[in-house]
């Protein structure tokens, strides 16, 4: 018999965050935590220097963007600190109102950048989230071998947002992202990546999410002793917060989100 738990697991609407006014300094109570989270390890964009390279070799040059974007100058683009209204209008033109109901509207670009930068981490500080928890409660059922497992009905909680994301034109998402990219890039450097390129980071995060395993359902869970649930399989529990978010969907939802992520990736990398 299915039963509902009052525990709420936040779910990352990856499509919304892909197109997401204040820099890290406006998250005053969580500056240290956010900066630490923003230092997530990213795969090197170029081969490392050989150990045989002499110490007296020429100084290392900054690594340029691996996935450069050509964002034409837009005089109508506001300053980052004043960008909330423009960014929200752009999002409203892409997604239905219900799909935007989870997104925190204040400082939207900065929050979205921080959120994306944390998706490869084991956990995400609440201050780093750009989204509210998905409405409803976790739906569990008794497992065939004892214990509890995610019920098939649990996927209904995510359906409106998955549908909105997967039905949105990937090229339109990419176009809005490119238009606001100068502000996105500024926000990314403000959180502690002075030489980084956000599009490189976004591509790395998408690739990371695409590597999420697709195990047989249903998935067994257990209380973690802190009022939440964790996957019993240690390999699944050790995944990042973004990958575990995908696992909480059903198999069809996960595959549909991955397909849309591939389309967005192609649009922001020219294939």
Image (spheres, rainbow, N blue to C red):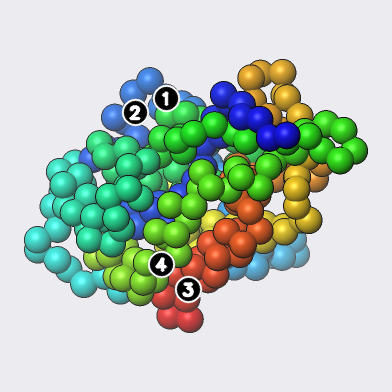
Q: Which residue corresponds to the image point at 27% horizontal and 50% vertical from the top-left?
A: 97
Residues under labels 1 and 3: Cα distance? Answer: 34 Å
Q: State whether residue 154 is above or below residue 44.
A: above
Residue matched to label 2: 27
Q: Is residue 269 left or right of residue 76?
A: right
The quadrant where residue 225 appears = top right
Q: State whether residue 110 is above or below residue 45.
A: above
Q: Secondary structure at mark 3?
A: helix
* Residue 135 image offset from top left, x and y in percent: 45, 35
Q: Secondary structure at mark 4?
A: helix
* Residue 153 image offset from top left, x and y in percent: 61, 45
* Residue 176 image offset from top left, x and y in percent: 27, 65
Q: Secondary structure at mark 2?
A: loop
Residue matched to label 1: 30
Residue matched to label 4: 167
Ranked by sequence position, the earlier of labels 1 and 3 is 1
Residue matched to label 3: 263
Q: Is residue 187 left or right of residue 1?
A: left
Query: In this view of the protein, which residue sits in the foreground, 224 or 220?
Result: 220
Disc 1 crowd, CA 10 A, few/some/many (<14, 14-19, 20+): some
Q: Residue furthest left?
A: 76
Q: Secondary structure at mark 1?
A: helix
Residues under labels 2 and 3: Cα distance? Answer: 33 Å
Residues under labels 4 and 3: Cα distance? Answer: 12 Å
* Residue 34 image offset from top left, x and y in percent: 46, 32
Q: State whether residue 30 is above or below residue 95.
A: above
Q: Which residue corresponds to the image point at 60% horizontal and 43% vertical from the top-left?
A: 154
Disc 4 crowd, CA 10 A, few/some/many (<14, 14-19, 20+): few
Residues under labels 1 and 2: Cα distance? Answer: 6 Å
Residues under labels 4 and 2: Cα distance? Answer: 33 Å
Ranked by sequence position, the earlier of labels 4 and 3 is 4
Front label number (1 vs 3): 3
């Amino acid at each position: 018999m299915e039963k509902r738990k009052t525990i709420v697991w936040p779910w990352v609407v990856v499509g919304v965050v892909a197109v997401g006014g204040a820099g890290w300094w406006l998250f005053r109570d969580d500056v240290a935590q956010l900066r630490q989270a923003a230092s997530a390890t990213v795969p090197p964009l170029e081969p490392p220097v050989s150990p045989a390279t002499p110490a007296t070799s020429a100084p290392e040059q900054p690594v340029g963007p691996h996935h450069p974007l050509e964002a034409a100058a837009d005089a109508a683009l506001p300053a980052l600190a004043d960008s909330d209204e423009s960014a929200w209008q752009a999002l409203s033109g892409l997604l239905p109102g219900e799909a935007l109901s989870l997104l925190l509207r204040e400082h939207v670009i900065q929050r979205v950048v921080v959120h994306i930068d944390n998706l490869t981490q084991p956990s995400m500080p609440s201050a780093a989230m750009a989204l509210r928890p998905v409405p409803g409660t976790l739906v569990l059922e008794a497992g065939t071998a004892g214990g509890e497992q995610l019920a098939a009905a649990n996927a209904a909680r995510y359906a409106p947002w998955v549908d909105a994301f997967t039905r949105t034109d990937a090229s339109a998402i990419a176009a809005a992202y490119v238009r606001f990219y100068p502000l996105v890039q500024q926000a990314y450097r403000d959180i502690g990546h002075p030489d980084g390129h956000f599009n490189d980071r976004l591509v790395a995060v998408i690739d990371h999410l695409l590597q999420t395993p697709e195990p047989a359902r249903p998935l067994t869970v257990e209380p973690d002793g802190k009022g939440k649930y964790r996957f019993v399989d240690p390999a699944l529990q050790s995944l990042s917060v973004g990958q575990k978010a995908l696992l909480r969907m059903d198999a069809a939802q996960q595959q549909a989100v991955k397909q849309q992520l591939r389309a967005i990736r192609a649009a922001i990398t020219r294939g």
